[in-house]
Each structure stands twice: as C-alpha cells, then as structure tokens.
Amino acid sequence: MRRVVRVKLLPTPAQELALADTLRVCNEAATYVSQVAFGGRDSHGRTGNKIILQDVLYQDVKDRFGLGAQPAIRVIGKTVDAYVTLRSNIAEGNLGLPSSRRRVKAESKPVVFRPNAAQPFDRNCLSWQHDAGTVSIWSTHGRLKNVRFVGDPDQLKLLATHPIGESDLQFQNGHWFLIATLTLPTTPVVEPAAGFLGVDLGIV
C-alpha cells in the first residue's frame, strides 16, 4: 500500500537559493526534453517512451544543464510522465472534443514546465536523517547537507519506520516541502467468523 507524507523544509538562506536554482535548472531541462520529444512524435502523436528518450537525451541533458546522472534520469522520467498524463486526460475527454480549443491547444505544442514546478528525487539524490530531523539532497550547487525538516509527529513516525520511495521537492506559497511516497504493508483481509453480524448505524 502506498502512503504520501509531506514535510516542511526549513532551509538556511544559502540552502534556499540552491534549492530554487535546482528547481529552475531541472525544469528548464525538462522543457528541453519535452521539446525534443514533441518534435519526434510518431504518426499517432506519441512522444516515445522513457527508455528511448533516456537513450537519446541522457548525455545531452547532463552536459547541457550540468545535471548529475540520477537527476538527469529523473528529469527525463518527469517529462515522460507529463505526456502520459496528457494522453490520459485526452483519452478520458477531460480536454474536450478533438476540435475543442482547449484540446487543440494542448496537442499542438510541447509541454512546458514552470520554473518552480516540483522535481522528483530518488534515494540516490536524497537521504533522510530521521533522528536529526534533517535531509541531505542533491542540488545544482552541490550536495546540501543538514537541511532541517518538520512535520506532524504521526507522519514523521511513518516516515522513519517505512521504506521511502520517490520524494518530490516542492515550492508552494513561499515555503519548501518534500512529498515522500512510503510503502506500507497491505492489511490482510480477514474472513468473519461464523455468526458474524454487521450493523449499519446510519452514520456518514
């Protein structure tokens, strides 16, 4: 079972500048990947899969934007995910009919990422020091160590006791956050014993 936990970061002024530059550069790189992917669409308008784009653009993205190996991979993955979401919205009719202005606009140009759009990191780019209440995170200014974080005590306990997958760096309303995805054990289904009675109390 997946669970999402959000913690607030309390970076120093220098750390905050590094985080802001990291989001800016990563999103510039993602927009670049998007433009290349959009230009290489097939006859069905598909932008290719992550493996193809990674093979074509991995070194280019690293060299052009000065990204490390894992951040470059995460940037390409984020771009692919954006197109998967776009195709899903189109298929579900969320952008209107084929001739609608909104759908035509969405299909006629590459996806563009905001300078401060969230950026995913994996365990190679980010590590948690739960006892100290800090994280170490890759940035375009080098590895940022001892970045403080705070959160709800119950959620911090979950964070410290379960495997952490991808974590998204997010800037919202002047504050910094990490959105961590946790893997929790699935609750086993229990068959009721003979004579079990369920009662509807009529409570919403």
Image (cartoon, rainbow, N blue to C red):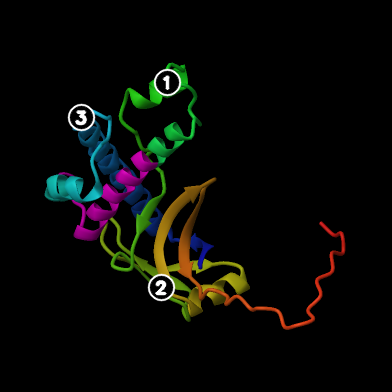
Rendered image quadrant of residue 158: bottom right
**Residue at the spot 57% in from the left edge and 75% down from the top edge:** 187
Q: Amino acid at mark 2?
A: Trp
Q: Which mark is residue 39?
A: 3
**Residue at the spot 27% in from the left edge and 30% down from the top edge:** 44
Residue 143, image x and y in percent? 28, 65
Q: Amino acid at mark 3?
A: Gly
Label 3 element class: helix
Write the start and end of the magenta stretch as one range: 64-84
Structural distance between the alpha carbons of marks 1 and 2: 46 Å
Viewer-proximal residue, 57 or 28?
57
Structural distance between the alpha carbons of marks 1 and 3: 20 Å
For marks 1 and 2 on the same chain, the one whose residue lies earlier in the sequence: 1
Q: Residue furthest front?
A: 194
Q: Nearer the viewer, mark 1 or mark 3?
A: 1
**Residue at the spot 15% in from the left edge and 44% down from the top edge:** 64
Q: Which mark is residue 98?
A: 1
Q: Which mark is residue 191?
A: none
